Amino acid sequence: MAIKSRIRTIPDYPKKGIMFRDITTLLKDPVGFRLVIDQLSQHYIENGVDFDMIVGMEARGFIIGGALSYTLGKGFVPIRKPGKLPGEVVDQEYQLEYGTDKVEMHIDALEKGSRVLLVDDLLATGGTAMAGASLVEKVGGVIAEMAFIVNLPDIGGQKKLEEKGYKLFCLTEFEGE
């Protein structure tokens, strides 16, 4: 059974007109969760993408990024919502599909020049990923690639990120759905 078939769609959440792709149904399925981590790991092992650290976006990026970090033997750095990190931070505001938000990262989270795999569950507008990339770059890191479980190409995030020169890897997509 494919990853896509394990993802639930919730119409009109968090507001009318949004088709929310809920990966909690994928994560609660031990076979589905293993498929995600195995397929991501396989991609990075087989394609030799060079990176030093995995950075995960709050909150589902922590789940995927943490498991992937363990599997690939890499460290993990969280990007959090404001006020959740105890040390000195840098922040970045960004646009969501349905509003605005802000994220933070410890200023000393990465060594200068560290190559980073940025991980999140879903790519829609690209706002969250752009904010994460901006934080990584502010502290001296370099984005090697971005990984997502789900891509929503009709919303335009993939195009926006690729136009900025970022490499992406997505396990599945919901196009025109």
Image (cartoon, rainbow, N blue to C red):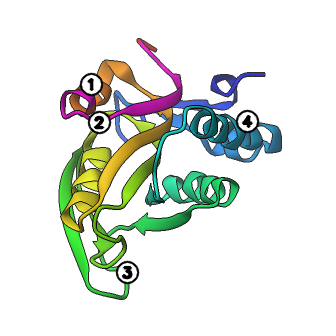
Q: Which residues are magenta?
A: 162-175
Label 3 or label 1, whichever comes before in sequence order? 3
Residue projecting furthest to the top:
176
Pair 2/1: label in front = 2
- Asked where in the image residue 110 lies, by quadrant, the reply is bottom left
Q: Nearer the viewer, mark 4 or mark 2?
A: 2
Residue at 26% x, 28% y: name it. Answer: 162
Using the rendered image of the protein, determine whether residue 102 is visible from the camera's viewpoint: no
> How far apart are labels 4 and 2 at the CA level?
25 Å
Residue 90 lies left or right of residue 44; in this view the side is left
Q: CA distance from mark 1 to mark 4?
A: 26 Å
Kind of residue at disc 2: Tyr
Given residues 49 and 25, the one toward you in this image is 49
Amino acid carrying label 4: it is Leu
Give x and y (percent) for residue 129.
32, 46
Q: For mark 2, what is the residue? A: 166
Mark 1: which amino acid?
A: Gly
Badge 1 marks a residue whose secondary structure is: loop
Q: CA distance from mark 3 to mark 2?
A: 27 Å
Q: Circle 1 is placed at which residue position?
A: 156
Q: Is residue 126 visible?
A: yes
Mark 4 crowdedness (10 Å alpha carbons): few <14, some 14-19, many ≥20: some
> Separation of disc 4 and disc 3 at Cα?
31 Å
In this figure, which residue is indicated by the disc labeled 4?
Answer: 35
Residue type at mark 3 is Leu
| Residue position marked by numbered label 3 in the rendering | 85
Q: Earlier in the sequence, mark 4 or mark 2?
A: 4
